[in-house]
Image (cartoon, rainbow, N blue to C red):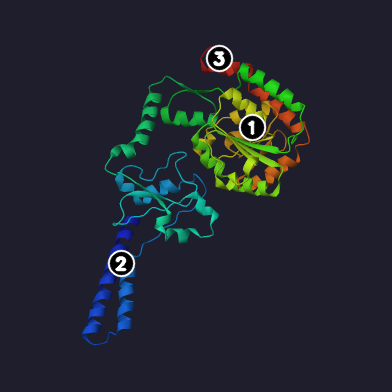
Amino acid sequence: MSTSFNEQFDQHGAWRRGFGLRLKLLAEWMKDHELLDAGVEERLRRLEIQVRADKVMVAFVGEFSRGKSELINAIFFAGYGRRIMPASAGRTTMCPTEMGYDADVPPCLRLLPIETRLQPQALMEWRMAPEKWTRVDLDVNNPQVWDDWYAYCSRMGATLKLCDGAITTNEFLAAKIRDFSGLPVAVVPNFMNREQLELSERVFAAKQDQQPGADGLIHLGYFSGSPSHNRDFALIIPALEELLEEDLNLGLVVVGYIEAGPRLERFGKRVTRHHFQDYVNLQKLVGSVEINLMPLQFNVFTNSKSELKYFEAAAVGTISVASPSLVYARTIRHGDNGYLAQCHQWTDVIGEAVQQLGSPDMPLRGRADALSRYTGAQQLDCIRAALGLE
């Protein structure tokens, strides 16, 4: 019968302890037989310390939301009866993360300030400088620290199962709800209300009288409705940094629960930020930029999003560049009514979108698409079906 992964780890630990003991006994034997000089004694002592203190490093490397956290839970924490490493949508990290145990260090999180990315040291060097990290102590004896999120999700799930049915905004999310609850689920896509449509008409009309870059800048816009988008925005920061450095005629507008961060704030007045907006003022801001940026990680959470950001921008004549999530890949026809960009393509695709701004065809096609599919009138049949009024 084969041994489990955890058992092999335990065996390796026992071997190291035994090897350290044998080194110590060897040093004592050599000393008793007058074979141990100071140099050999020092080398044996260092080797014993190294063997006892050395840690086994196991690396898990993969794209976002490909199951790394779940694999870690399965290998190291299966016996706990619950996930120790958070694996819910939006909970995983987009940066190197190390988990470890040190008997001399209390339970804590150590966070490396993002400003260190502006310095030349490698991550391995920062690991050797604990004073540069921000430490957040964790109270492992307080169950509320660990249970709040799980309880919140459980309450939502329990509430859902008490319902007779559900309505959601795309088929991917509908399938997830069906699998979880067994309930009938109807899909009613998001759409613009009358106020949004009337405002979009005015914004679009005013935009037709202006040329892109009329104020000296071509504006890229990122519009966030919640703090959950920080990691999405992080996907395009390197591309934005490169583009802003190369083209002094580019500007960036950041709206919502997002900070531009030091890598972009260094571009001064070319980067502007607005706080969270209501949907009316948001529509005006979306219309004030030429290109709407919609980066998304690829995971269950982002694939559950609707076409909202696309059609709000299209209705005011703003071109969108989006990650090819399931919804956006189905909605946006690359080069026709918008652009799609994989993680490594953002610099090139934004550059292409900027070069094509002189042609009015794409904004017109995007607007026509939005008005033909994402208004209340277009969704009446879906709404009646969802409410059982057919």
Q: Earlier in the sequence, mark 1 or mark 2?
A: 2
Image quarter of the N terminus:
bottom left
Residue under label 3, please give it.
384
- Left or right of 304 on screen, residue 138: left
Front residue of 53 and 105: 105
Residue drawn 51% across the image and 30% down it? 173
Q: In the drawing, what numbered circle is on residue 331?
A: 1
Q: Amino acid at mark 1?
A: Thr
Residue drawn 38% across the image and 45% down it? 85
Is any atom of residue 189 visible in this view? no
Q: Mark 1, mark 2: which one is toward the viewer?
A: 2
Q: Tell me the crowding category of disc 3: few under 14, some 14 to 19, or many 20 or more residues within 10 angstroms, Cα based.
A: few
Residue under label 2, please give it.
52
Between the C-alphas of marks 1 and 2, the distance is 58 Å
Between the C-alphas of marks 2 and 3, the distance is 70 Å
Measuring from the top left, give residue 65's x and y in whole percent: 49, 44
Q: Tell me the crowding category of disc 2: few under 14, some 14 to 19, or many 20 or more residues within 10 angstroms, Cα based.
A: some
Q: Secondary structure at mark 1?
A: helix
Q: Tell me the crowding category of disc 1: few under 14, some 14 to 19, or many 20 or more residues within 10 angstroms, Cα based.
A: some
